[in-house]
Image: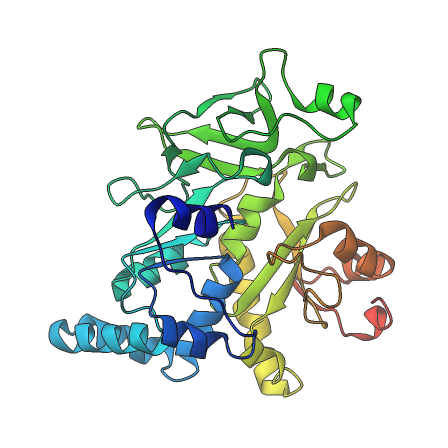
Amino acid sequence: RCYVECGSFVVGFRIFFAESLDTFIADLQRARPTLFLSVPRLWTKFQQGVFSHIPPKRLDLLLRLPLVGKLVSHKILAGLGLDQVRLAGSGSAPLPHGLIQWYRRLGLNLMEGYGMTEDFCLSHISDPEHAEPGYVGRPLPGVLTRIADDGELLIKSPGCFHGYYKLPELNAECFTEDGYFRTGDLGEYSADGLLRISGRKKELFKTAKGKYVAPAPIESYLCEHPMLELAMVSGVGRAAAYALVELKDELRDKINDPATRSAVEQALGQHLQQVNARLTNCEKLQMLVVAHEQWSIENGYLTPTMKIKRSRIEAGVSDSLDGWYARQTPVVWADGPAARGAG
């Protein structure tokens, strides 16, 4: 709302409203927006919809052909209602690098930005000249930032709120003495001033090895795999971390087939090895656990902006963790006998 509604007051945008979730694609095709902002989950859903009509390997082949590739790209974007988009943005959570590159290959100028309710989203945004995958851009004019000694991003901007209502103790905790807001996000700047968010400060956890693990970057690596929809890395006090992963819709309905399940298990096992090769020893995952229940807003596993609710998910599987770790296998199915009734 900060960007879309208030931006329209300043620039003069015409705003379209979706009638419902069920009519969203039709509403998008009706609107033909020139500016479109969304969350990573929706960008993933769009891609899945394309793959349901054109298998990824065939699409890749078509896009390699100069003339045919342009026609196919235009047809895909037109089908999504995004063929008139001049600027597409994503926020609220990291976008996998591969997903950004996939959209850019179609000709969609997809970029990431970063902002919070507390600063009215007057924070960071990418632009066509500075849109490196994995980075959320540079500070907007008038925005002051610095990185604290512990890696936390501190910010001061004209959009920053003055404090929490009737909570002076929380205000003292969340603001520095010179007025910078403690975002709770860990970040670092590249040599050319681009910000990379590496995770939430409060999401850091320690395994039994005594080293802190930041789950967000690992989750981003995991979600680069075309079979996976979402991932959550945890493992507080365990010998090693683990990841609970959700399969994409088209696979979730087929895993009762033994051949499909075997193929998925083999592919995820290989993916686990590849991800672990990118991690330090204390970050390496012992296993991938395939969730048996879809994560949604309705069942409380996702926020309204499609972020995972860690505490809710962790609580739902806590009774099954000992059994999963005892299996000593790289891929565990959460709907197995040891996990039934875990929630």
Number of residue marks: 0
Residue 129 figure quarter: top left
Viewer-side residue, 335 vs 299: 299
Residue ID at (74%, 47%): 235
Query: What residue is shown at x 38% (from left), y 81% (from top)?
Result: 55
Write down the quadrant of residue 262 in the picture: bottom right
Q: Is residue 58 left or right of residue 229?
A: left
Residue 204: x and y in percent read 67, 37
**Image height of 254 relative to 17, above or below:** below
Position of the C terminus, as image quadrant, is bottom right
Q: Residue furthest left?
A: 67
Give the answer, above or below, for where 202 lies relative to 277: above
Locate residue 100, reporting x and y percent.
37, 56
Please give the name of the residue rendered at 37% of the width and 38% of the height, measured from the top-left corner. Answer: 137
Can residue 256 be seen from the camera position used here?
yes
Residue 151 % position (x, y): 56, 25
Q: Nearer the viewer, residue 101 or 88?
A: 88
**In this view, 160 is above or below 45:** above
Scheme of image coloration: rainbow
Left or right position of 334 against 105: right
Residue 219: give x, y in percent of width and height: 57, 51
Residue occupying image coordinates x 45% and y 54% = 96
Image quadrant in which you'd find residue 128: top left
Q: Is residue 321 visible?
A: no
Residue 52 placement, left or right of 128: right
Above or below, comparing residue 172 to residue 231 in the picture: above
